[in-house]
Amino acid sequence: MRLIPEPCEEIVLLGAHCDDIPIGAGGSLLQLCRARPGLRVRALVLSGAGTVREKEERAALASFCPKADLEVTVLDVPDGRLPAHWDRAKDALHALRDGATPDLVLAPAPHDAHQDHRGLARLAPTVFRGVLVLGYEILKWESDLAQPNVFLPLAEESLREKIELLHRHYPSQRDRDWFDSEAFHGLARLRGIQSRTRYAEAFHSDKIVIGV
């Protein structure tokens, strides 16, 4: 069953690390932003401030959100230490919430094996109450991929562009054994099969309200 959402005017993007958002939802962002020029996009990334990774992230999100009204905030929470910086992360989310009225929030999935991803996923719905929060997938070496329940079909050109932009903007990640075109393409094809399309990105939601 396909549900067409009401007009989306603003979205919030949450990432624990630089590259999380484009890896998990880059194709969806390309399509959403192109379908709605001027879409208000507010992104918060918890780690990487003051490093080469921040520069990569800002350039990448500008490419993944074409023609959007984009604002990006990158903090310097140490990688792998979100549980020890819980208050700071929650304060940052509340500050973002005070200046945003999103129709959609994209965040990590709550079952993710990485403690930073999992912690941010658990914070998101406590701050953005009454907003649709979708948890994106981050492919990595841990066996933590679960069966998603929300799919956004991707045009083949959107998937190709996503993969090209990931390699262009994140040279610091190219030595990762999971960071390659075959892996990104394969996951998108699998989610396409499951949604009866060619390619798709998939998300996790614990609550969706349907109106008539």
Image: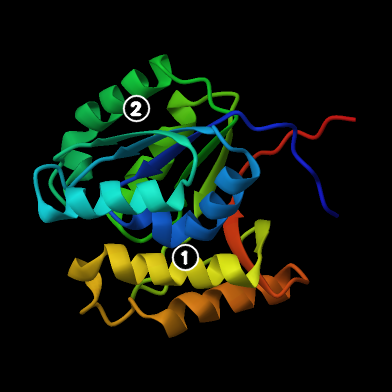
Mark 1 and 2 residues: CB-CB less than 8 Å, in contact?
no
Give the foreground label among 1 and 2.
1
Do we see residue 192 in this rendering? yes
Front position in the image: 44 or 212: 44
Q: Position of residue 187 (x, y in %)?
A: 53, 75
| Residue drawn at (82%, 52%) of the image | 2
Question: For mark 1, what is the residue?
Answer: 162
Dividing the image into 4 quarters, which one contains the N terminus?
bottom right
Q: Is residue 196 above or below residue 39?
A: below
Query: Which element is circle 1 on?
Result: helix
Residue that numbered label 2 is attached to: 93
In the displayed structure, would residue 168 be above or below residue 37?
below
In three-dimensional space, the C-alpha distance between marks 1 and 2, rounded to whole angstroms, equals 27 Å
Measuring from the top left, give residue 87's x and y in whole percent. Answer: 22, 27
Question: Which quadrant of the figure contains the C terminus?
Answer: top right
> Three-letter amino acid code at disc 2?
Leu
17 to the left or right of 189: left
Q: Return the x and y of residue 151 as percentages of the image width and height.
A: 67, 58
Residue farthest along the left direction in this orientation: 50
Q: Residue at x 41, y 71 (%)?
A: 164
View extreme (right): residue: 212
Give the x, y percent position of residue 39: 55, 33
Q: Residue most toward the top? A: 98
Label placed on residue 145: none
Disc 1 marks a residue whose amino acid type is: Lys
| Label 2 secondary element | helix
Name the residue located 23 percent from the left edge and 55 percent from the top edge: 56
